[in-house]
Amino acid sequence: MAFWFLFILLLGLATYLMVQHSVAHITRTPVWLLWLVLMTPAFLLSGWTLMYGAKQPPPSALIIWSLFVCTLLYWTLFQWGRQAPRDTQIQTPAEASESQPAIQPTPEPIVRPIELTEETQLRNCFPWSVYYVQNIEYRPQAVICRGQLRTKASNAYQQIKTNIEAQFGDRFVLIFQEGFNGKPFFVLVPNTQAAKERNTPRRDQEQLTRPGLALLLLVATLLTTTLVGIENADVSLPPIWEIGSLFKVLSNPDVLFKGLPYALGLMTILGIHELGHYLTAKFYNIRSTLPYFIPVPFFLGTFGAFIQMRSPIPNRKALFDISIAGPIAGFVVTLPLLIWGLAHSDVVSLNEKTRLLNLDALNPKYSILLALLSKLALGSQLTAKSALDLHPLAVAGFLGLVVTALNLMPVGQLDGGHIVHAMFGQRTAIIIGQIARVLLLLLALVREEFLLWAIILLFMPLIDEPALNDVTELDNGRDIWGLLAIALLIIIVLPLPQAIANFLQI
C-alpha cells in the first residue's frame, strides 16, 4: 500500500513537470489546474484503494468515465487558454528549451523582428523561380513568409537559407514548415542562441556537458539497480532506508554480486539506447548533453536515462535517424541478454497468479516476441501450461523490451512520435498519434497492465517540435526502417495469437 501511494506521488511530480515543459508556454490556463485534471483518475483509484483495499478492483465504469470526463475537461481548459493565434504548428527553438514570460491579459503590441526598410532585402532572398512570396506576416517573435513553392523542397530551403544568411548573417533561424492546408511556408525566428553567445564572454558561457555529474549519476544508479537486483535474486535485503543495514549490504561482496546481473543488464540497455541518440546527434553536429541516468532506491532502481539536445534538428532525415537510433541500439543489445536470461530461467506452472508483471511466474504468451524468444531459448521445456520464473538478466532484458515498446509508441515527443513525424509529416503524425492512444486505451480495457501507460499517453501532447526543414520527405530506405520499427512495436505489445501458440506447442 505504501509503495502504491509513493508511486502516485512520483507520477504526480512527473506529470506536473511534463505539463510545465510541454504546454505551459502555449496556454494561459494555470499549470496546477491542468495537472489536477490529469491526475484525477489516479486520485480516484487511490481513494478507492484506500477505502476498499487493493484486492477489490474498482468498477470499470469509474475508470472509463473518469478518463472520458478528464480528457474532455483537459482539452476544454487547454483550448480556453490557448495563446497561438492561428498557426499552432509554429514553435521556435527558443520556445522549446526556455521558459516563457507570463502573458498579460491585455493585448500586446505587434513587434516587427525586422525594420520596414529591410522588407525589400527579405523579399529579395526569395527568388520567384524558387519560392514566390505572396504574403509576409509579422508576429511578435517571428516573420512568416507564405507563397508558392516552385522547386524541390530541399533545394528551396538550402538556397533561401544561404540568401538569408548573406543578407542578415546569423540574426535569424530559418524554419521551413508545411501548414495544415498542405502548403509549405517559411518562418524567420530571431536567433537568440547566437545573440547570447556574442554577448556572453566565453568563460561565462554555460557548459553543455557535465561529465562529473554524468559519472555521479551513473555510479548512483548502479548502486540502486544493484540493490533492486538483489531483491530480484531472492536474497533477503534489510530496509535500505536504514544506514546501518545499507552498510552491511555494501560490505558483503557476495550479496552485491548477486544483484549485478540485473543492474549491469538494465543499465547497459538504457545506456546504449541513449548513446544511440547521442552519437547520432553528434553526427549531425547537434549540441547535446551526455546521457544522464536517474537513480531511485526502489521500483526498478532507475527511472531511465536521458539526453538533452540544445540546438534545433536540421531536417526530417536527421530527426528520423536520431529518433530511431536509440530504440534500435537498445533492442540490439536487449536481444542477446534476454535470450541468455531466458535460457537460464526456471519453467514453472501456469496458474491464476500468472500475469504480465509477475516476474516470478510470467506468461510469455502475453507478447508475440517474448513468446518466440522464450521458445527459442527453452525449446521443448516450454509448454502450453508453462510460465517463467525469470533470471535477473532476463528481467533486465524483459524491461528492455518494455522500454523499447514505450519509446516506439507513435505519440508526440516519444521516439515513435518523432519517427512517424519524419516519415509522414506533422499533420499525419498527429492523426496516427491519436489513433495509437485510442487503440492502447482499448487494449488496456482488456489488459489492465497497460492502463497506466494508456493514461500517460492519453494526456501527452500530440504536436511535435518541427525540424528546421520540416518539408523535405525521407527516402525509401528510411521509410522501410520506420515501418520495421512500427512492426517491432506491434510484436512486443500484442499477445501471441492462439494459432501460432498451437503451432509452437506453447
Image: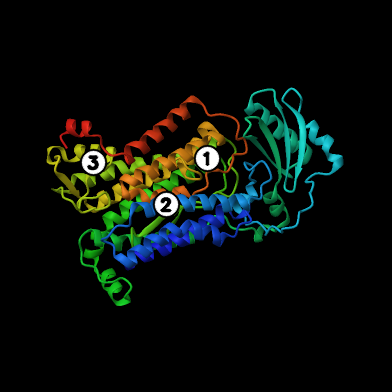
Tell which circle, 2 or 3, labels the residue nearer the N-terminal end: 2
Tell which of 13 and 214 is nearer to you: 13
Q: Assign a secondary structure to mark 3.
A: helix
Measure how far apart labels 3 and 1 are at the Cα level.
40 Å
The location of residue 444, given as percent across then percent down, is 35, 46
- Circles 2 and 1 in contact, beta carbons < 8 Å: no
Give the residue type that dot 2 points to: Trp
Tell which of 311 and 42 is nearer to you: 42
Give the residue type that dot 3 points to: Lys
Vertical side of 113 occupied by 238: above or below? below
Where does label 2 land, which residue? Answer: 65
> In the drawing, does residue 160 fall left or right of residue 494?
right
Tell which of 123 and 222 is nearer to you: 123
**Mark 1 neighbour class, 10 Å CA radius: few under 14, some 14 to 19, many 20 or more:** few
Tell which circle, 3 or 1, labels the residue nearer the N-terminal end: 1
Where does label 1 land, which residue? Answer: 283
Q: In the rendered image, is residue 203 in sight? A: yes
Q: Assign a secondary structure to mark 1.
A: helix
Measure how far apart labels 2 and 1 are at the Cα level.
47 Å
- Label annotation for residue 365: 3
**Mark 3 neighbour class, 10 Å CA radius: few under 14, some 14 to 19, many 20 or more:** many
Q: In the rendered image, is residue 271 in sight? A: no
Measure how far apart labels 2 and 3 are at the Cα level.
30 Å
> Which scheme is used to colour this image of the protein?
rainbow
Q: Residue at x 72, y 51 (%)?
A: 195
The location of residue 160, given as percent across then percent down, is 71, 32
Q: Assign a secondary structure to mark 2.
A: helix
- Label annotation for residue 111: none
Q: Quadrant of the C terminus?
A: top left
**Mark 2 neighbour class, 10 Å CA radius: few under 14, some 14 to 19, many 20 or more:** few
Give the residue type that dot 1 points to: Phe
Q: Nearer the viewer, mark 2 or mark 3?
A: 2
